[in-house]
Amino acid sequence: MKKLVVFVEGQTEQLFIERFITEIVGANGIVIKKRKLTGGSRSKPQWVRLWTSASGPGRDYFILIIDCTGYTRVNSDIRDNYDSLVSEGYSAIIGIRDVYPEFNHVDISKLRLGLNYRLKTRPVQVVFVLGVMEIETWFICEHTHFGRVDSKLTVTRIKGSLGFDPSVDDIQLRPIPSNDLDAIYQLVGQQYQKDYGSMQVLLNRLDYTSLYCHVRNRLPDLGALIESIDTFLTP
């Protein structure tokens, strides 16, 4: 069984990755496990089991998605657990975190270099994926979902009210995409909220085929994530 581990900064990313893989690949042949890594500076880190999909014969791939509970911990948690993961047979490791609020757009290249600091590259090369400036950029660029929030939430209305076009503009240049997403929803009296239930509603509205086939061409990091998952799933 091939094994992939994805370290993410929080619940939003964990739920999205789980749903994205399930929608694009399907549940057959894959076991997905979600964990949260707690503790840290003053206490020993602990793995908290959150959920595991059904397992059984014919499952060729195992994917572990770890919520590091903070953007600053993605790199260090990968570094601290690298050797044990390799010894357990993981052949692919991905780290996902936002740029904001720790870094500005001009600091992205410095962030990318820093993520690889003191990190082993053999036998497994870690792939880091950034939400530029936040993962909410991906949700905004999948602009077709706004019509499933409210039929009145058109691209024309968003552009006229907020001054940017989510279908063509480079949303990576927006300083705080989560604020933009909330502003879009507020045009029809709704809010963008990050609790578990609200995130499930948002994930139900996204078009994953659009993300996989089209949005990836606008967002290099999303493209890198998809390429890494595709490579892992190649027999």
Image: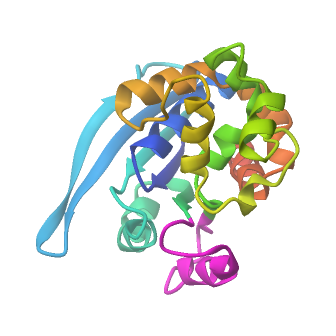
Asked if residue 145 shows in the view, the reply is yes
Whether residue 235 is visible to the viewer of this picture, yes or no, is no
**Horizontal and vertical percent position of residue 89:** 47, 54
Q: Residue at x 71, y 13 (%)?
A: 151
**Which span of residues is magenta-colored?**
99-127
Q: Is residue 165 above or below residue 80?
A: above
Residue extending furthest toward the left = 43
Q: Decide if residue 92 is on the left or right side of residue 146.
A: left
Q: Position of residue 52 (x, y in %)?
A: 36, 29
Tell me: residue 55, above or below residue 160.
above
Identity of the residue furthest to the front in this view? 161
| Residue at the image position 14 percent from the left and 67 percent from the top | 44
The relative height of residue 231 versus residue 204 in the rendered view (above or below) is below
Relative image position of residue 201 (x, y in whole percent): 49, 21
User: Residue 7 magenta-drawn?
Assistant: no
Which picture quadrant has residue 183?
A: top right
Decide whether residue 126 is among the magenta residues: yes
Nearer-the-camera pick, 201 or 111 = 201
How are the residues colored? rainbow
At 80% across and 39% down in the image, what residue appears? 159
Q: Nearer the viewer, residue 37 or 199?
A: 199
Q: Residue at x 67, y 73 (%)?
A: 105
Between 107 and 90, the residue placed more toward the observer is: 107
